[in-house]
Image (cartoon, rainbow, N blue to C red):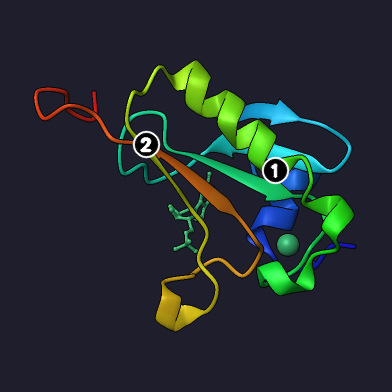
């Protein structure tokens, strides 16, 4: 299932370019276009759903293992995994996504 108006569905289809980190039948991971730190990644189910509660369990099972591997690959000792649902909760793209945000040491910049 996908939504014609959804930017992340367009990224899944390849209609909008992205820097892909991982892809499988159900999951895509790519770099965030406005990274909060170097390596800020998004891990999404290919299935279109706005909130976590819209996604079937079988489309979610790979998400955390992929986020974990990307966190390991980033080399970050400190990182956040975040997932926002609804505007008040700071969700601005209406396709479920998990952020993997490395927290660099204070001496490291975005670089
Ligand atoms: P939210 O606030 O909805 O949890 O986060 C949405 C994230 O998607 C933001 O960090 C934003 O930078 C990222 N984003 C929005 N549009 C695009 C895009 O077209 N490409 C990529 N790679 N990231 C995007
Ligand atoms: Zn979508």
Residue 38 falls in image quadrant: top left
Residue that sits furthest to the bottom in the current view: 88
**SS of the residue under disc 2:** strand
Q: Is residue 99 visible?
A: yes
The answer to whether mark 1 and mark 2 are in CB contact below 8 A is no
Residue 3: x %, y % from top left: 80, 68
Identity of the residue drawn at 79% across and 65% down: 55
Identity of the residue drawn at 79% across and 50% down: 46
Q: Residues within 10 Å of mark 2 (few under 14, many from 20)?
A: some
Residue 80: x %, y % from top left: 39, 44
- Residue for badge 1: 63
| Separation of residues labelled 1 and 2 (CA atoms) | 16 Å
The N terminus appears in which quarter of the rendering? bottom right
Direction from residue 35 to residue 16 in the image, left or right: right
Q: Is residue 15 visible?
A: no
Examine the rendered structure and indicate whether residue 110 appears above or below residue 9: above
Image quarter where ligand 2 lies: bottom right
Residue 52: x %, y % from top left: 68, 67
Direction from residue 41 to residue 48 in the image, left or right: right
Identity of the residue drawn at 69% across and 27% down: 22
**SS of the residue under disc 1:** helix
The C terminus appears in which quarter of the rendering? top left
- Residue for badge 2: 79
Direction from residue 45 to residue 71 in the image, left or right: left
Q: Nearer the viewer, residue 56 or 90?
A: 56
Residue 86: x %, y % from top left: 53, 79
Examine the rendered structure and indicate whether residue 8 appears above or below residue 3: above
């Amino acid at each position: 299932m996908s939504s014609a108006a959804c930017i992340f569905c367009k990224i899944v289809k390849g209609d909008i370019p992205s820097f892909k980190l991982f892809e499988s039948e159900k999951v895509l991971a790519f770099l965030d276009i406005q990274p909060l730190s170097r390596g800020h990644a998004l891990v999404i189910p290919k299935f279109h759903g706005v909130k976590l509660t819209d996604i079937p369990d079988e489309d979610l099972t790979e998400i955390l293992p992929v986020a974990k591997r990307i966190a390991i690959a980033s080399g970050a000792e400190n990182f956040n995994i975040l997932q926002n649902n609804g505007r008040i909760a700071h969700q601005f793209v209406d396709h479920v996504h998990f952020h993997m945000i490395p927290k660099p040491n204070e001496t490291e910049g975005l670089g």
